[in-house]
Amino acid sequence: MAEVLENVAKGETAESGSVADQKAHEFFSDLVSKLNVTEFLYNVKGMSENEYQMWSAAINKNLEPMMRSNRVASNVACANKAFEEFMLALRVEKNVKLRKLAVDISRSKLYIWAEVEDDDESSMRSVLYADSVANLKMEELGFSVSATVVEKSDCVPVPSHYVKVIDNESK
């Protein structure tokens, strides 16, 4: 620590004057400016009730509501990313014919429900392949994908709590 303070006193940094140094300065300057604006808006109650409550919780060191809110936002972001990875992988596959596609999310998983035509092994394999690809991409984030594939003749309805993305019932 003493060495770091000596370097600062001499005006030396790891990359003094570099592009990285300038970017760091701009980032922190911008952050301080935004915090000053946020402090002003907080003091005059010029922000939404949710924002005001979030900052009040932080100021009062009541972090649980913020952690819950961040957890929900993180889950939604991970689910969106997992679905994007799934769809990108599915798009690469040729001749995928889905009758129905629906999704649901939990704390750490995206559930995908797909219905294909009877005996359409190619589409089934493609859905399972896309599931595997999405899982590989999301593993590092602690988020996973679980795909269920059924055939039309199984006559299994989309679970009621799932959100339908594709519904080609009449085809």
Image (cartoon, rainbow, N blue to C red):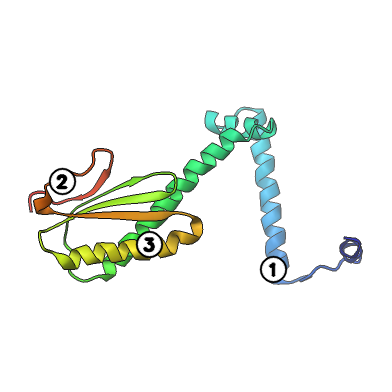
User: Disc 3 vs disc 1: which is toward the camera?
Assistant: 3
User: Percent x, y for residue 105?
Assistant: 37, 45
User: Disc 1 vs disc 2: which is toward the camera?
Assistant: 2
Name the secondary structure under disc 2.
loop
To which quarter of the image does residue 87 belong? Answer: bottom left
Query: N-terminal of the two: label 2 or label 3?
Result: 3
Name the secondary structure under disc 1.
helix
The residue shown at (49%, 47%) is 74
Q: Amino acid at mark 2?
A: Val
Category of crowding for the residue at label 3, using alpha-carbon neighbours closer than 10 angstroms: few (below 14), some (14–19), many (at least 20)? many
Category of crowding for the residue at label 2, using alpha-carbon neighbours closer than 10 angstroms: few (below 14), some (14–19), many (at least 20)? few
Q: Is 87 positioned to the left or the right of 35 in the image?
A: left
* Quarter of the image that includes the C terminus: bottom left
Question: Residue 156 shows which numbered tag?
Answer: 2
The residue shown at (24%, 66%) is 126
* Quarter of the image that includes the N terminus: bottom right
Query: N-terminal of the two: label 1 or label 2?
Result: 1
User: Disc 2 vs disc 3: which is toward the camera?
Assistant: 2
Q: Which residue is mark 3?
A: 134
Q: Is 58 positioned to the left or the right of 84 in the image?
A: right
Measured in 3D between alpha carbons, the distance from the residue under mark 2 to the one under mark 3, in whole angstroms, is 25 Å
Query: N-terminal of the two: label 3 or label 1?
Result: 1
Q: Is 30 positioned to the left or the right of 84 in the image?
A: right
User: Percent x, y for residue 70?
Assistant: 53, 42
The residue shown at (15%, 46%) is 156
Name the secondary structure under disc 3.
helix
How many tags in the picture? 3
To which quarter of the image does residue 120 belong? Answer: bottom left
Q: Which residue is mark 1?
A: 20
Measured in 3D between alpha carbons, the distance from the residue under mark 3 to the one under mark 1, in whole angstroms, is 33 Å
Q: Amino acid at mark 3?
A: Ala
